[in-house]
Image: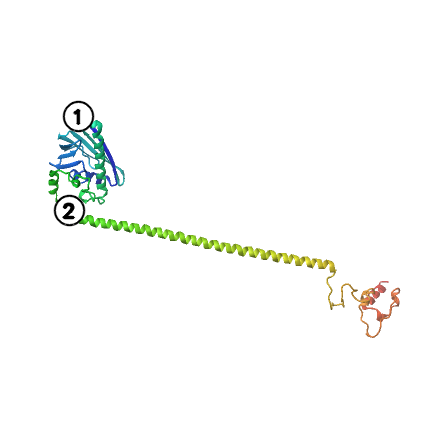
Amino acid sequence: MAEHHASVEVNAPTHQVYTLFSHLNDFPKYMRFVKEVTYYDEQRSHWVAQIAGRHEWDAINEGWVADSQVGWRSTNGLENQGKVTFQAIGPNRTLVDVFLYYNPPYGKLGAIAEALAINTQFDHDLQEDLNNFARMVEQTPAGATEPMASHYLFNEQSALGSGTATDQQKTSMSQDPLMSEGALGKRDETLQQQNQAMQQAQQSEQQRQRQARERQQQSQQAMRSDLEQQAQLDQQARAEQQKMQRQQAELASHESMDQDTLNARAIIGGRGPASTNRPLGDMDARTARFPGNEQDEMAARRVPANPNQKEQPQDTLNPSVHQSEDESPWTRSIESEEEEGH
């Protein structure tokens, strides 16, 4: 037997994927190489498919495991068998693998054609139909297990969409309550509402993203403005600090110059610069402090009783001849102490 394999990952929980695939008679609604799947009963079905030409067979279900695997085997017509497995690869993600085995028709000629090119085309068609199944599931509302709830039905590539489904398939579907004119009208209305809701949701999301971008831009602009303002304040603060430092340096320089000037004047002038009206009659530091300073200090300070009387010269060699009225109290006190001591 020739062997073919195809796989696809579906964005849906495993139970939903398994249940939707188990509607075998809905294959022509979204697949293209399956032209008919009609039921005899719950276990037996009739198939028409485009596999190296148009072929028919009857099949019986086998190897079905809930939420894990479906399988079949032909009982007449094109000899084939196959299985489809479903494996969860995430909370809402399922890996679907299809394995198909069949004996090429036309004996050796068919085997040669299968080996040369037909198998490549069949692999391509099988993969495309499995991709269509994934699209059908992903465009079905979450949790729905009826293919008629999907938006992706009767597409241009499907057997029904392209008009290549068998008359028996069309008759079988016409007997399906979900395929009645009223049911199809209700389905179209529901899909239209869902499409509008989807468009509104997309528009709302786009608006939300646009507003988020605008807020981000405004925030960035406000941040740049704050940084520029802070930079200006920092620059002003630095300028004020530099100005204050210059003023302090200039003030310190003036104070240093004034102190140097005072020090220089103190050194050059002795007791200091000339001054008027000093307590003891000093008129100029360069002159004698008072007249007669070479005499006895206390006597020189005595003021004559009569301002018009002239001072009599005193004999500095013999203090004992001093008259008592010319002596100062301080001198008389010292003399008295000396006499008592003798």
> Which residue is situated farthest in the top direction here?
108
The residue mark sitting in front, 2 or 1, is: 1
Residue 200 placement (x, y as % from top left):
26, 51
SS under mark 1: helix
Query: Is residue 1 at all visible to an observer of this figure?
Result: no
Instruction: Give the residue at mark 2.
Output: 184
Against 315, is 58 above or below? above
Residue 109, numbered label: 1
Residue 299 placement (x, y as % from top left):
82, 67
Residue 44 placement (x, y as % from top left):
12, 34
The residues bearing labels 2 and 1 have C-alpha atoms spaced at a distance of 45 Å
- Residue at point 26%, 50% (across, down): 201
> Residue type at mark 2?
Leu
Looking at the rendering, which quadrant does residue 50 occupy? top left
Residue 124 placement (x, y as % from top left):
23, 34
- Residue at point 17%, 48% (across, down): 188
Classify mark 1: residues with Cα within 10 Å, few (<14), some (14-19) or many (20+). few
SS under mark 2: helix
> Residue type at mark 1?
Leu
- Looking at the rendered image, the quarter that the C terminus falls into is bottom right
Looking at the rendering, which quadrant does residue 272 occupy? bottom right
